[in-house]
Amino acid sequence: MKHSIAIEVNGEAWALDVEPGEVLLDVLREKVGVKSPKIGCETGDCGACTVLYDGVSIRSCLVLGVEADGHEITTLEGLSHDGLSTLQQVMVEMSSFQCGFCAPGIVVAAHELLQQRPDPTREEVQEAIAGNLCRCTGYDPIVDAVLEAARIGPGDASQGKGP
Amino acid sequence: MTIASDFDYRRPATLEEAVALLAGCDRPLLLAGGTDVIPWLRNGLASPGMVVDIKAVPGLDRIEWRDGAVHIGSLVTFSDLIASEEVAATIPVLAEASHTVASVGVRNRATLVGNLCSAVPSCDAGPALLVLDAAVEVVGPDGQRGIPITEWFRGVRRTSLGPGEIVTGIAIPDPGRHGACYVKLSRYRGEDLAQVGVAVLVRPGGESRVAFGAVAPVPFRAPAIEEYLAGRALDDDTRAGLAPLVDAAISPIDDMRASKEYRYHMSRVMLLRGLAAAAARLEGGGPPYGEQVI
């Protein structure tokens, strides 16, 4: 039986009909059309599908679309709609990623960290992205970029609007 | 990938409604955080007729003091426990154990009670709640009851929860002044299941409580070790006498995460480290809660 749900995605209201078995990740990608949350492990281990759900990071592969009724979702697209954030800009400059598959999840996870802890330690950055698997870089250029973005602070990068 | 299993989804607004839904359905599955339930639905480990989402039931998301106990509702997440001043002040070992669970994005959603209900042998909540003498509070067709945590785990993925029952929360009696430690061994820092988990709680007067996870079909308390430790100073003789007691208490297996022999060895080491940290914490010193002792 289909359920009617109302969700907000990156500030935009959506009214959708979903089957109970449809996972939020698929609803976002196929029905809303945001493609930054990636389909990786689908067991919650890889973090490629990370989105903000009422402001906190979650695995969108571990939530049913029907559960999300009445909730606000922010994806990478919602963090960068005014141009790249400071964090993203620094990641570009420091070549933090190679294939980029993990990037949307890591940016969202690191964004949440910088919101909560504007001046994190290296260990706190590592913990914040410990659930986001990157198979290219060995993590160092990613962690370096998050620390550099924290050092610069929100709003100081050339075109950023804050981490 | 859409979940192939065909089920009905319901989100009751009250506990009474939830209990009534469970009573009227032959294959219900309760949903809270969903971090275990959704994978089970996807891989076919669960194929319910109805998924009953309890997230709209009011009052289950609280951590509160009542009748001399800390009550943790069944919608309280691991991130809630880590952030709770109440938990930090009274039962910090629960925050310490919560911090070792999976990753931030999973802890933001996964609940303490869900971890208990999944009842996997390596569940991090088990050893910590065992040394805290917790009780699992349930409501069902026959009313409310409390299940001591020592009687909760019945086997791998099996609990004492009866048909039609819902866990509403966990009650932890005030442990008073104490020192405690949860030691988790995993293959790397970051998200991994426990290869061994050891929880220790010591109180003034020489009482020690010890529990293990991931080294038997269920997390369990070790009364023989507790009796041996009662009133003894943690000197070299006492420490030497612990090894055979640990070996007798645990029954680890070989699996993809560790060999049986490694688990035996590390269980002995981790118990000593946990006892030393708990004893130091009792006296106001030792490593801060959350700092790894292994």
Image (cartoon, rainbow, N blue to C red):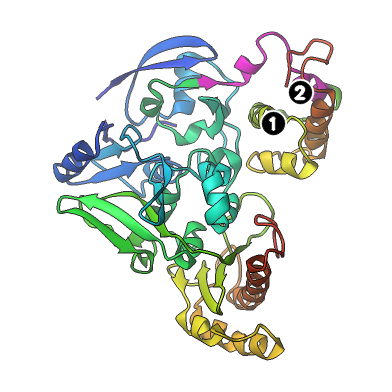
Q: For residue A56, what is the image quadrant?
A: top right
Residue B6 in percent (x, y) is at 28, 35
Counting other residues with Cα less than 10 Å from the Cα at mark 1, is it few (<14), some (14-19), or many (20 or more)? Answer: many
Label 1 amino acid? Ala
Residue at image x 28%, y 31%?
Answer: B11
- The kind of secondary structure element at disc 2 is helix
Q: Are marks 2 and 1 on the same chain?
A: yes
Q: Nearer the viewer, residue B263 or B234?
A: B234
Distance between mark 2 and mark 1 Cα atoms: 8 Å
Label 2 amino acid? Leu
Q: If you read the primary sequence from the N terminus, does the residue marked by circle 2 or circle 1 appear first?
A: 2
Residue B111: mark? none
Residue B29 in percent (x, y) is at 29, 44
Q: Nearer the viewer, residue A74 or B48?
A: A74
Q: For residue B194, what is the image quadrant?
A: bottom right
- The kind of secondary structure element at disc 1 is helix
Q: Would residue A98 be counted in the magenta stretch?
A: no
Left or right side of A155 for A12: left
Left or right side of A17 for A133: right
Residue B38 in percent (x, y) is at 41, 40
Question: Residue under mark 2: which chain is it in?
Answer: A
Which quadrant does the C terminus of chain A fall into?
top right
Q: Would residue A80 be counted in the magenta stretch?
A: yes
Residue A110: mark? 1
Q: Which residues are magenta?
A: A73-92
Q: Nearer the viewer, residue A27 or A90?
A: A90
Q: Label 2: which residue?
A: A87
Residue B79 in percent (x, y) is at 54, 42
Q: Are marks 2 and 1 in contact (CB under 8 Å)?
A: yes
Which quadrant does the N terminus of chain A fall into?
top left
Question: Residue under mark 1: which chain is it in?
Answer: A
